[in-house]
Amino acid sequence: INNGFFSIITFLLLQPCFAQSSKPAKQRPNIVYIMSDDHGYQAVSAYGYGLNRTPNIDRLAKEGILFTRASVTNSLCAPSRAVLLTGKHSFINGKIDNEARFDWSQDNFAKELQQHGYQTALIGKIHMDGLPQGFDHSAVLIDQGEYYNPNFIVNGTKQQLDGYVTDLTTDMAIDWIKDRDTSKPFCLLFHQKAPHREWLPALRHIAEYTKMKFPEPKSLFDDFTNRGTAAKTAEMNILKHMNWAGDNKVPPAMMDELGLKEGISWDKAAFNNNLGRMSAAEREAWDKVYDPIMEDFKKKYPSMNEQDLMRWRYQRYLQDYLGTVAAVDDGVGRMLDFLKENGLDENTIVVYTSDQGFYLGEHGWFDKRFMYEESLRTPLLVRYPAEIAAGQKSAALVQNLDFAPTLLDYAGVSIPKDMQGKSFRKLASGKKKWRDAIYYTYYEYPSIHAVKRHYGVRTDRYKLIHFYYDVDEWELYDLEKDPEEMNNVYNDPKYKTVRTTMHKKLNQLRKQYKDSDEKDQRFLPKKKQKI
Ligand code: SGN
Ligand code: CA
């Protein structure tokens, strides 16, 4: 009897909860949450699109889990960040678009971690006014931030730093971990500005990336047959709405020579401001690579038709966009190496994601905002060897809404009841049960890129979207038959039952998340603007 009694005691003492209570702080995992800006999953090689190589981000897929259908609830920068922090939809946390004020005084998961003994930091882009709350340390860019020699606000004080933004952000992220209090677990939000517009790669990458030629997406010349008004009137076409100087790097003087018109009013100013930030040596190195490309373009321009121009602009766009991704990937590699070299790789959860997806020429577009796949979905990879088996793939419908509860769950901090997301901790370690539908809202209209207000539901197979405000249009897509969303089947009699089921699902989600027509109305601009 005695032996049996003692072996039960020994067994109990060896259980994780007992082991944890003897060494509480050390056992709790660290968190390195890496989020870039506008990084479409098509530009992460682990997703298999073959556009570019991101060997370091791919390490997370190899050693952890890759989510193939992770999505955001509102495909725009600042709203996405507000959802990440609060675990609540935009219409609850109040940050519905890039313009709305974010109320930092509301609860966020970093505050919760801080209150439970974590040290926290936010480094890089946050795109919200006001001193970030919930962080022991913050070093954030102002608004969108700058690529070369950028300004940061370090704990409330503005500083101009010399160097390339992606590398500086990585340096600061690593230095903060180096300088941390080793008696406490940490949570670092490591947020890159890249690959946000206007896509200025690091000097070490420009020669290589400007020589690359990328395959064109099938829908590069999409004419939007079988789609609604919103897709037809959006202003994010690579040929018609991109900036010649700011985006494609055609010097303003050459634009004048060729008679090229500014895409938007700050087209030339963007070029001058962005390149004007470089030191003389940086500018010389830049011009050495870009001047010959532009001279070549000038020669060819007179004989180019619209299709040739679209093709040229698409290649230019991807060269610079993917060039900026290269430095993001270098930074992820440096972070992973640093964690390993310092014995932190086993007990640190590393997340890689983006604030939303991005169009890389699909439908002829750049930018995001729509509930269509390329901008709804976002890359998501998580490494945590203590719980997540290597080389996993999940098609579960996880969302950025779930980050706050998930990270709190891993940290052993109870999840506030009013958070709307769900922890995907168990899902990441193999449990199958998960939600069967996600809810989406978008509000920034009338505004840049002219993407109309909409909301919708996506299930495993179908997507139902309602565009409203100056239209009242419904779209339904069968993602299994039409993964590229080229054919709206809302009025197709064959889909009558699906349509009814999806409407029901949508109503149910709107109720569950506490959204309504009345709320949509409340967020409309005060005066109806003429578009
Ligand atoms: C800027 C960009 C837009 C982009 C928004 C929002 N134009 O206005 O293309 O959609 O930011 O991006 S630019 O000519 O100024 O670059 S977000 O990621 O911050 O939401
Ligand atoms: Ca963004």
Image (cartoon, rainbow, N blue to C red):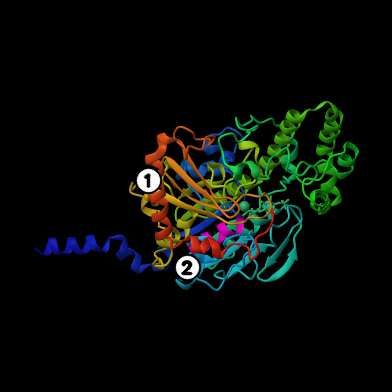
Q: Residue at x 63, y 60 (%)?
A: 98
Residue at the limit of the structure toward the top, as seen here: 303
Q: Is residue 267 left or right of residue 509?
A: right
The stretch of residues the image draws in magenta is 77-87
Under circle 2, the secondary element is helix
Q: Is residue 394 left or right of residue 177?
A: left
Q: Quadrant of residue 216?
A: top right
Q: Is residue 418 left or right of residue 336?
A: left
Screen quadrant of the N terminus: bottom left
Is residue 84 one of those drawn in magenta?
A: yes
Front tag of 1 and 2: 1
Label at residue 501: 1
Nearer to us in this view, 189 or 379: 379
Q: Count how many numbered circles sit on residues in the image.
A: 2
Relative to 504, residue 87 above or below = below
Label at residue 113: 2
Label at residue 462: none
Q: Residue at x 47, y 61 (%)?
A: 516
Identify residue type, mark 1. Thr
The residues bearing labels 1 and 2 have C-alpha atoms spaced at a distance of 40 Å
Residue 168 image point, x, y percent = 69, 55
Q: Quadrant of residue 319?
A: top right
Residue at the limit of the structure toward the left, as seen here: 1
Residue 395 image point, x, y percent = 42, 42
Q: Is mark 2 within 8 Å of ligand 2?
A: no
